[in-house]
Each structure stands twice: as structure tokens, then as C-alpha cells.
Image (cartoon, grey):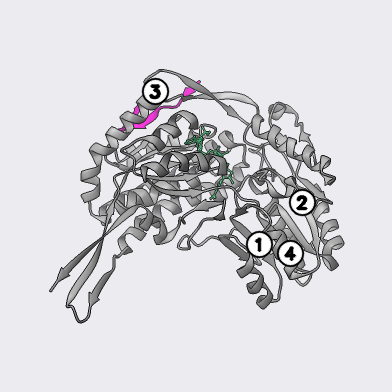
Amino acid sequence: MQQIKNYINGQLVAPKAGKYIDNYNPATGEVYSHIPDSDEQDVEQAVQGALAAFPAWASTSAAKRGQLLMRIADLIDKYQDRLAEAESVDNGKPLKLAKAVDIPRASSNMRFYGTAIQHFASEAHYMEGTEAINYTVRHPHGVAGCISPWNLPLYLFTWKIAPALAAGNCVVAKPSEVTPMTASLLSELCMEAGLPAGVLNIVHGYGYKVGAAIVAHPNVPVLSFTGGTNTGRSIAATAAPMFKKLSLELGGKNPNIIFADCDFNNALHTSIQSSFANQGQICLCGSRIFIERPLYEQFKQAFVDKVQNVTVGDPMEDGTKMGAVVSEQHMQKVLSYIELARQEGGSILTGGQQVHLSGRCAKGWFIAPTVIEGLSPECRTNTEEIFGPVVTLTPFDTDEEVIQYANCTDYGLSATIWTKDLSRAHRVAHQVRSGIVWINTWLLRDLRTPFGGMKNSGVGREGGFEALRFFTEPQNICVKL
Ligand code: NDP
């Protein structure tokens, strides 16, 4: 059985303690590889490797660093089929989705920051009267800690390490232990691309061991984390007294607002995607669908009909629209929320249970796409993140009412608005407390834009030059002329 290795100081190495964790294929429920159960000794070794590599990497020209990132991007493209298959097996997502979204986006991330760093200029301020000039130097911090989740494994992993490396930091990164495979393949691509030893280090293992050791390490002054809000809170509790720079991309409970004057077919078709893509395990999925009352019954009927035609199946098969959820534990969590919705008085319009497939996937973890109505916007089902293929439908009458519904959770990551009245769309968008609002579309991403959440959905912004600013420390130099 395949045994994944850590990537430390340019080498693939076994964990020092020699312990491993079982890695499951969620579509079959079977163990198919072993992951290092690393600990603080491995993190120490990785941080030392990164510290040793830092002076040379920080003084490498931006153009050369960019070229290396673009070489890695080219290798991701070259091996895209292998990476997509690995992502699908590891995560349970349809192979088609991994090919169309996850892997192309991973190479775009590397290419984007490989070029962005070459256009990243710092500011100068001339002081009239006193005849002085200030200029800003942006220094890399040193060793950056990057911790990513399991839902979009290589996509989100590269979204962090690309700007960190481009800006001249060395990195100690931890992918989710639930989906380590593509990060492990990336180690090999970095070696093939000729990335200098120690510049990127990938340590596999549990969050409470490896993640916590990276967060607490005194030589890791900057941390970029994507994951759940509770984990973000515990990371902030460790990092804040150490005055570490923190970027936190956390959970969401996103509203999908459908006005009666929308382009019906477009809203309907896209709402199927925004509800169930990646089995509903995207932080940007719109799990609370609010429909203007005159359209409610028509939308509900058409939506439920379409959901009943979403094929849940073997992720490797072409016709599969929804694959397995990521783990048995996660499946139980999602099912427990469906049970909670029943207790809170919700009616299950379709779905609501585990799906048992036959053949190779007989022991896999599949959930039927689930649509629920009849719940109050303030109940737990409607305010806590479920992170699975479960959505609720709620009617509304006025703009003020739907804005209040949209804002009545502690989260504020994204929102979607469907209407042909653009004045209303802008008015509502400005009042919804979400870091990103899509109008008549969903998941359309321009990598130059600031990405992140309001309220408990995060701290700081990723994307574009925001990430390069985060991964550098500005220093003002003032010269009297
Ligand atoms: P978790 O918070 O459980 O884990 C995220 C990462 O942190 C994993 O690598 C995990 O390791 C690690 N980790 C866990 N505990 C600690 C700790 N104490 N110290 C340091 N690291 C730790 O999130 P999930 O992996 O379950 O991902 C789902 C969550 O991610 C959802 O809430 C989702 O909304 C959010 N998310 C947010 C996005 C955004 O951009 N805002 C994008 C995508 C997802 P391990 O796997 O071993 O536990």
C-alpha cells in the first residue's frame, strides 16, 4: 500500500516517529494509502530547513521566483490527469469536477502569483515643503505557515503557498490529513521543477499535532489558514499573544436570494450548482435559498424536480454529478443536521438520507441532495454551517426582510442575488454583510479581487495584491533631501 512522505528540505522523508494514519477513499470506504502521522519533531525539521533556505530565496529576484512558480504550473498542467484522479479518489468528488475546476485552478494560482510578483510595486511619498522622500520596502516575513482544508485540496493549498513563495517567504505547509494526496504529488513536481531545497516544506498529519505545532512555532511569524471557524478561533488564541500576522478564511452560511423578476432558467440552473457542487462542500455554496413569494411555488417545484435528477454515483463515472462526501465522520455530521432540521419542524422535500450504491461503491459515503422548507431563518439549521448537500427554501416579501434574513447568521462569506433590476441588486448587495456578492452568477472568480469573509467568516483578505501585501512586511524609509 502506498505510503506518503513528508517533503522537507528538498527530500521526501518518513515521519521521525515512524507512525502513519490510514487514508480512506470516501467512494469505497476503504483504506488505500498511509499518511505520515507527523509531530512537532517533523515540524521543527521543516522550520529549520525553511530558515536555512530563506536568505537565498528572499534575495532571489522576483523574476526568477516567478519563473519557478510558472514551471510548477506547467508541471501541474502536464500531470493534470494524474492529479485529477488523485484528487477524486482522495476526496470523493467527481473526476470530471477535479479535471474541470480543481487542477486547472491550482496551476492558475501558481501562474497568477508567478506573474503578479513581477508587477508588485511599492509606494513612494514625496513631502512638499520639508523636502523629504519616503519609500516603502516590502520584506518577506521569513517562514510562513500555510494550513488548508479538505474540500478543494490542491486548489486551496496552492492559493496560499503561491503568494507566500512569490513574495520571497519560505513555507511550512500542512494539507488536511483527510486529503493529502495531491499535496504529496506536488512535492514531486517541486523537485522536478528545481525548487531549491527548504523553500517549500510539506508536513502531513493531524491538525491538533502538526497544525498546532506550526501555529505555535516561534520562528513562524505569519500564518495563513483556511478551515472551520472554531479551528480559526483556536489558532488566533495561540497566535495573537505571539503577535503573529494572521489570515483566516473560515466558514460560511451563504444566502442565495432569488427575486421574482430574475432570469428564471439561469437562476434555477445555477442554484443547482451553488447548492450541490462538490457535494455542497464549498465554503461559497449558497445553502440558504430565499425566494420572493410570487415565485416561491414555481421555483420550488422546478428546483425539486431538477434535484431529483442529480445523479449521485461513482465519482469516476462520467454521468455522476455528485460523488461521495469526504469521510464517514462528515457524513454523520451532515445527516445529524438533517435530523435537526426535522426536529426544528422542517419538511424534507427531497433527499434526507444516505444513498447506498452497489458494486465498487457499496461501502462509500454518499448523501442524497436534500431540500428542506418550513424553517425559520433564525433556527440552527439555517444559521450553522452544515457543509454538505443540504439547502433550505424560505419565502420573503420585501427587500428589507430578505436583507435581515441574509444577515442573521454569524457568518459573512458570500451571497448571491438573482434579479433583472440592477438598481435593486446593488442596493441589496451593499447591505448584505458578505465579503463577496455575486449578482446573476455564482463562483465567478477574478483572481485579482480581494477574497475573504466578514464577521466570523474570517480575518483579512486573500487574492491579488492583497495576498502579496499580507505575505510582506512594509518598512517605511524616510530620507531628508
Ligand atoms: P478544519 O478547521 O477542521 O481544518 C482545516 C485545517 O486545519 C486542516 O488541515 C486541519 O487538519 C487543520 N487543523 C485542525 N485543527 C488545528 C489546530 N488546532 N491547529 C492548526 N491546524 C489545525 O476545517 P475542514 O478541513 O473541516 O474544512 C472545512 C471548513 O473549511 C468549513 O468550515 C469551510 O467553510 C471552511 N472553508 C473556508 C473557505 C474560505 O475560503 N473561507 C474555503 C474552504 C473551506 P486536520 O485535517 O488534520 O484536522
Give the mark nearest the N terminus, 3 or 2.
Answer: 3
- Residue drawn at (38%, 23%), measured in percent from left and top? 14
Q: Residue at x 53, y 41 (%)?
A: 84
Q: Earlier in the sequence, mark 1 or mark 3?
A: 3
Q: Residue 67: within the magenta?
A: no
Task: Report how far apart the C-alphas of labels 1 and 2 lie in the structure.
Answer: 15 Å
Label 3 sits on what residue type? Answer: Pro
Q: Which mark is residue 15?
A: 3
Query: Which of the image's four quarters has the C terminus?
Result: bottom left
- The residue tagged 1 is 416
Compare marks 1 and 2 and give the one earlier in the sequence.
2
Instruction: Of the two numbered discs 4 and 3 on the same chain, state the one appearing first in sequence.
Output: 3
State which region is magenta.
1-14
Earlier residue among tags 4 and 1: 4
Marks 4 and 3 close (CB-CB < 8 Å): no
Q: Give the quarter of the image for residue 272.
A: bottom right
Nearest to N terminus: mark 2 or mark 4: 2
Disc 2 target residue: 392
The amino acid type found where label 2 is placed reads: Thr
How many residues crowd mark 1 within 10 Å: few (<14), some (14–19), many (20+)? many
Please tell me whether mark 4 or mark 3 is closer to you in this view. 4
Q: Residues within 10 Å of mark 2 (few under 14, many from 20)?
A: many
Query: Label 4 belongs to which residue?
Result: 402
Secondary structure of the residue carrying tag 2 is strand
- C-alpha gap between disc 4 and disc 1: 12 Å
Seen in the image, is 460 located left or right of residue 385?
left
